[in-house]
Image: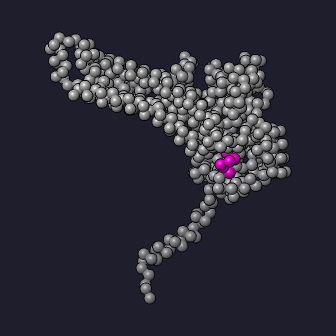
Amino acid sequence: MKLLTATDVVFGALIVLAAGSPAVAQNPPELRWGGDAEGGAPYVEADPGDPTKVVGYEVEIAQLLAAGLGRSPRFIQTAFASLEASVARGDFDIVLDGIEDTPARRARLAITIPYHQFREVLTVRAADAARFRMLADLRGRRVATLSATLAYELLTKAQAESGVIPITYEDDVHPYSDLVLGRIDAVLLDDVIAARRVAQNPGLISQPAEVGAGYYVGILAPGNTALRDRIDEILKAAMRDGRLEAIFRKWKMWNDDQQRLYARVTAAPLDIAADTSTSGTTTAPGQWEAVRRYLPALLNAALITLGLSCVSMALAVAVGVVVASGRVYGPKPMRLALTAWVETIRGTPLLLQLFVLYYGLATVVELPAMFAAFLGLGLNYAAYESEIYRGALEAIPAGQLDAARALGFSERQTLLLIRGPQAFRLALPAMTNDFVALLKDSSLVSVITVVELTKQTSIFANNIGSWVVPGAVCAALYLLLSLPIAHAARRLERGWSRKRV
């Protein structure tokens, strides 16, 4: 018989202890749920008393579901635009964050029964309340909303019918602050959001007329129907015994709409497709049919991207040349000031600079969105361009400069006739690279309401519920924009190289 060693005894004891450990046995599985705390109350927000925790009615619904499943809830922070893709790939079990029920979501995900009915309301400045009562009154006016929502669909329909101009935002805070400032004429969003923002901005009012109606649901991965069915039963039970009503009353969201919704959901299966079709939502088209419909908008957005990139690069080159010349030829105080400016711009994110230009300066000067985008991109890249030009100027051999001075050339003549042309040839490859980078970085201007190519693609993808085809189309358009630029730069480089030989 083989004798047990001390190691065998210790290892076996550890296995027994682990198997019988109360801590392991009492640890329940988790219900991982996704949301975006940036959206704020009453959905999900950081607890003011303890920012490491989240509060909101969705948090309490997650706790209710977890208790019914015998699990412990765990919140996973995810950007709102990425919630669908993240739950589809299994990053968490369910999304609870004011998610609207749409045909596109039902086609590709497992959707719970609706647990809240919302209304789309039009918010305007109090001074305009008498003349802007409904969407039809806003012909040719700018109306803000969030992309990939029922409100956005209603606005695109109104655009075709009455000439309303939809303006999309990344969050639900700045539409209302821009409405106060007069940058837009109205906001169309859920009554839940509008009620909170109107309370924060006394100069605003929401019109009583309902523009549309929809439902909040939970979304799960398409293969997770078994968990979805269990969650549906828990929600129905909470509707019957009043637990859901208590949550919504606590967050001041209970009204007669919810009472009627719960009565219908618990009495018989709810034909949600029929309900949403009456509130402005249409059947989701196939992906290639959607490409055909969206292609004109994508091409228009591509032109905006190209035009904005070209004028921004022109500004970057002009400012970059001035800054580089000042750092090479200027007196010491000027060199120090320009160096500080370059390091400040390079050391802070472009996204932050765009926010400061558009929102931060709004109390002083209200820059149009496109102009703020032009300034932000141009000045940001000017800092990088100036470093390229400075390095190229300093790379010219000192012997050439001494020879120019010996021949009686002034510093200005030396720069324009000898140093500048050679430096430009050295800088050209890096300039081309920067222009392609700027073309792609222009996607960031969507945060200040400019609908460029990436933003339009995001709207397209969210509306059809998939990024595969929209992403491929977007990538192809970016390649069509950038490859000719790179090819032209290479031809120019080869031409200069032959001239040197």
Q: Find out whether residue 108 is within the magenta segment.
A: yes
> In percent of the image, x 83 and y 38: which residue is there?
256
Q: Nearer the viewer, residue 315 or 349?
A: 315
In-front residue for pair 484/386 = 484
Where is residue 17 drawn, in percent x and y? 54, 70
Q: Residue furthest bottom?
A: 1
Figure quadrant of the N terminus = bottom left
Name which quarter of the figure residue 344 lies in. Answer: top left
Magenta stretch, main secondary structure, is: helix
**242 sits to left or right of 463:** right
Q: Residue at x 38, y 19 (%)?
A: 318
User: Can you say which quadrant of the picture contains the C terminus?
Assistant: top left
x and y, in percent, of residue 464 in the image: 64, 41
- In the rendered structure, the answer to whether residue 404 lies left or right of residue 117 reads left
428 on left or right of 76: left
Image x and y of residue 132, in percent: 74, 20
Residue at (77% x, 36% y) in the render? 279
Above or below, 114 against 337 in this view is below
Which residues are the magenta region? 105-110
Q: Quadrant of residue 128?
A: top right
* Nearer the observer, 6 or 391: 391
